[in-house]
Image (spheres, coloured by chain):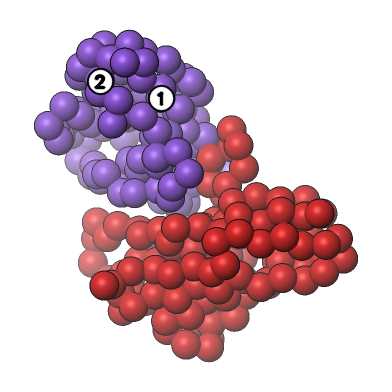
Chain colours: A red, B purple
Amino acid sequence: DGGITQSPKYLFRKEGQNVTLSCEQNLNHDAMYWYRQDPGQGLRLIYYSQIVNDFQKGDIAEGYSVSREKKESFPLTVTSAQKNPTAFYLCASSMERGTGNTIYFGEGSWLTVV
Amino acid sequence: GQQVMQIPQYQHVQEGEDFTTYCNSSTTLSNIQWYKQRPGGHPVFLIQLVKSGEVKKQKRLTFQFGEAKKNSSLHITATQTTDVGTYFCAGPAGGTSYGKLTFGQGTILTVHP
């Protein structure tokens, strides 16, 4: 099946640790995104990448890092510099050509700091 | 920066009642998209509106895009328990990336049987 796979589904992190969330897509989409979801605040963009080996900061990039070495993969690292990392993280992808392209989300990863 | 506001934040209805959520942008939008997120799930694309004054229907759901392309609404007729979830509107956040969106905070819909 085509789609976006995120792992792990649930992750617990100790304070001071870095963790990496995986995102893989087989939709042949050019662009990939990471959004963070907190209760009552909707979704906020962390980072996005329109092409391999290039990525841009979103609205809340501080404390996060990404890489885009392959078209299919866009991992997100939540670093110890992120002061409030407990949240639901959503990876998404879309085509970058034409108009009216939709964005497809993965099933998300729940990160909890313990 | 661009802001997208949604009201109400919560809506509780009895099954069979109608439901409407409203979305307002601080800037003119080239398009607006609507997503539904079931409890514990991820957002799923519902529809995109592009034209000023556009109205689209999906069974019991009616979507409207305002004439000024700064507001939108989603109306559900005769709600069912399967309509439960959070409904988000989202508009392009600028730049060249189609998926770079600014989301409203969402309207959480609960339906009592």
Please indicate whether residue A87 sits to the left or right of residue A97 in the image: right
Which label's residue is closer to the chain start, 1 or 2? 2
**In the rendered structure, are the residues bearing label 1 and label 2 in contact, judged by CB atoms less than 8 Å apart?**
yes
- Circle 1 SS class: strand
Q: What amino acid type should be assigned to the residue bearing mark 2?
A: Thr
Task: Please provide percent x and percent y for residue B2.
Answer: 53, 42
How many dots with numbers? Answer: 2
How packed is label 1: few (under 14 Cα within 10 Å), some, or many (20 or more)?
A: many
Task: Please provide percent x and percent y for residue B87.
Answer: 39, 34
How packed is label 2: few (under 14 Cα within 10 Å), some, or many (20 or more)?
A: many
Q: Nearer the viewer, residue A10 or A64?
A: A10
Q: Dot 2 falls on which chain?
A: B
Task: Please provide percent x and percent y for residue B91.
Answer: 40, 45
Residue drawn at x 39%, y 68% as measured from the top left: A4
Q: What amino acid type should be assigned to the residue bearing mark 1?
A: Leu
- Pointer 1 residue: B109
- Pointer 2 residue: B79
- A73 vs B36: above or below: below
Residue drawn at x 62%, y 42% as measured from the top left: A38
**Residue A31 visible in image:** no
Position of the N terminus of chain A, as image quadrant, is bottom left
Q: CA distance from mark 1 to mark 2?
A: 10 Å
Q: Nearer the viewer, residue A2 or B87?
A: A2
Residue drawn at x 31%, y 49% as measured from the top left: B45
- A81 vs B106: above or below: below
Please indicate whether residue A49 sits to the left or right of residue A17 in the image: left
Q: Dot 1 falls on which chain?
A: B
Q: Nearer the viewer, residue B17 or B24?
A: B17
Task: Please provide percent x and percent y for residue A69.
Answer: 53, 88
